[in-house]
Image (spheres, grey):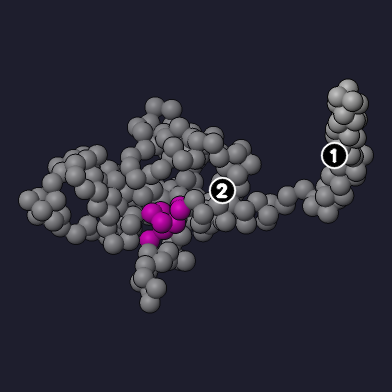
Amino acid sequence: MKNLLIGTWLLLSGILILACQPDNKKLADDAMEMETENPATTAEDSVKRGEHLSHIMGCHDCHSPKMMTDQGPVPDPSKLLSGHPASESLPAMPDKSVIAPGQWMLFNGGLTAAVGPWGTSFAANLTPHATGTGNWTLENFEKALRHGKSKGLDNGRMLLPPMPWPNYINLSDEDLANLWHYIRSLPPIDNVVPAPLPPA
């Protein structure tokens, strides 16, 4: 009786496993249908995907100058990703007895400049102007985002905080290219961002 029960259980298990196996022909047909419905990505699609990524990755948080609205500061659409405005002076630092070096990180009102133990850093101009990424290649862009190299140069200094480049190390090649295509589609803005300042 015990052997009969084991045999029945094995038979039912086998039938269940076979019933759950995917229909490879059906999977192949579905894949072919999806491929037909979604033709190859166009240049416009790539730019749109890159624009989407620029928002969810927080690029505009620091690299786009802000304008004040009823909802608070928002990226200025006429200056997207143009970096810290060269003409904008930073406010005086608070009293050091209140904020001691190394204990706080401060941003300016537009979030385009940050002060911390590393000194003062300014968000770069990413637009395709010569004062931004105009002379960069996709390879430079990749080295900046995945390796934290300033201007994407092998012998460049490391990017300073608050640039979160370690978050982008595993960005897919496709999304890296999409982001690059979006940046290249922006109007070039002449804006020489100040060099970083060492700690006071």
Q: Nearer the viewer, residue 27 or 96?
A: 27
Which disc is residue 88 wearing? none
Q: Is residue 161 visible?
A: yes
The disc, 2 or 1, on the residue closer to the chain's N-terminal end is: 1
Point out residue 199 in the picture as x, y percentages from the top left corner: 18, 40
Q: Could you tell me which secondary element the residue under label 1 belongs to?
A: helix
User: Residue 55 or 140: which is nearer the viewer?
Assistant: 55
* Most distant residue in the left direction: 97
State the SS at label 2: helix
Image position of 165 (left or right of 107): right
> Would you say the residues marked 2 and 1 are in contact, meaning their CB atoms lie under 8 Å apart?
no
139 up-or-down from 67: above or below: above
Identity of the residue drawn at 41% across and 54% down? 63
* Residue at (89% x, 39% y) in the render: 19
Q: Residues within 10 Å of mark 1 (few under 14, many from 20)?
A: few
Vertical side of 79 occupied by 33: above or below: above
Question: On the image, numbered disc 1 is attached to which residue?
Answer: 20
| Residue 193 relative to residue 142: left or right | left
Picture coordinates of residue 106, whole percent (x, y): 24, 52
**Magenta region, mostly helix, strand or loop?**
helix
- Work out whether residue 29 or residue 155 is closer to the camera in this orientation and state it: 29
Q: Which residue is mark 2?
A: 179
What's under tag 1, amino acid-wise? Cys
Q: Residue at x 19, y 44 (%)?
A: 103
Residue, far front: 1
Q: Residue furthest bottom?
A: 70
Residue 184, image x, y percentages: 55, 50
* Amino acid type at mark 2: Leu
Quadrant where the N terminus sits is top right
For the record, the magenta segment spans 58-65
Give the crowd class for mark 2: few <14, some 14-19, many >=20 residues within 10 Å. Answer: many
- Disc 2 and disc 1: Cα gap in Å? 41 Å
